[in-house]
Image (cartoon, rainbow, N blue to C red):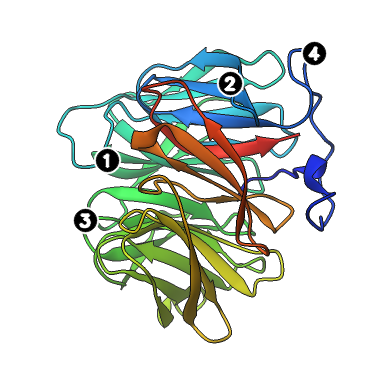
Amino acid sequence: MARLIASALVVLLASCGGETPLETPPTATGPVLLVSQKASKSVAWYTLDGELVAEAQVSDHPHEIVLSPDGSTLYVTDNGVMQIENAGNGGNKVSIIDMKARERVGEFDLGKYYRPHGIDLCADGTLLATTENPDQLLLIDRETRETRNFGTGGETPHIVHCSPDSKYAYVSNARSGTVAKIELASGEHHLVETGARPEGSTLSKDGSKLYVAHRDADKIVIVDTASWTVAGEIPTGKSPVRCGLTGDEKTIVYGLFGDGAIGFASLETGRETGQLKLAGPAVSLEMMEDGVTATSCAQDQDVCYVISVPERKILYTVHTAAGAGPDPALLLE
């Protein structure tokens, strides 16, 4: 979940408060959308009117992104191929982006570990990244740049989340139909079978539940993180790929690749309650820190959206550069 607040939207949405706002450069007034652009091998900043404010090149085909808690640094997995299905060795870098300068200022060289995909920051500062070639979870010390690696017990590890206490990593093994719980002190892992092609996931605030979107099973699976067992399932529309929880944890929101829409489901009833149509297949879904605003992008259509979850309404449609191939996006103040 993006650690941000789109406070400029408070006139439209109730906000829960949050971190110190980022300063907006003179070239943009108001909020901007930060977008990971797979095809153009960059991250870019756009106004909500679609004006390109700045662009920072990365090493090769970026996928997931995570922002440091203070908003000063962005970490980007430079996967090296466009899609999970594509063949190829891939890249072996995690780019470091200075958010104030809006430029790439360094990288973590992953050595023999290629195709980094999922990324997360633990509360203790440890940076986690999954790699698909070979299938591993990497623990990166941001100060020393030393790396530890653990097996995930499955094929094609995708999205990763760190537990609130920084003791465990939860990794979806997309080609194995399993989700792994990995103890970060020892590397010991436990697997639970969840269904076909688990991809995106999100944690409850207390860390007791992990919600996992299953692209080829049309469902969200709820995993109890203590017992590491399946606690329930929520049927969805076609091909959910990423998901997030509202601040009150009553609604789960997800990008539907197959339906070209955003889906909404009630955690109380376990049922889908509606969809919001987009211009094309949704490849991403990020919930903002305010708990009511989401972003999603349709990669092939080069368009991203800012969405009011309570209103189930598109607030802003942001057209990226032609051929950019946008994936995850963060709304910045």
For label 2, the crowd category at 10 Å Cα-Cα, with few meaning under 14, some 14 to 19 and many 20 or more, is many
**Which residue type carries mark 3?**
Arg
State which tag comes first along the sequence, 1 or 2: 2
Residue 251 sits above or below residue 79 on the image = below
Q: Disc 1 designates what residue?
A: 132
Look at the picture and state if 202 lies above or below 12: below
> Which residue appears at 82% of the width and 58% of the height?
14
Residue 142, visible in the rendered structure:
no
Give the mark, 4 or 2, whose residue is nearer the N terminus: 4
- Amino acid type for the residue under numbered disc 1: Glu
Of the image marks 3 and 4, the number of the one nearer the N terminus: 4
Name which residue type carries label 2.
Ile
Label 1 vs label 3: CA separation? Answer: 11 Å
* N-term-proximal mark, 1 vs 3: 1
Question: Residue 238 falls in which quadrant of the image?
Answer: bottom left
* SS for dot 3: loop
Q: Mark 4: which amino acid?
A: Pro
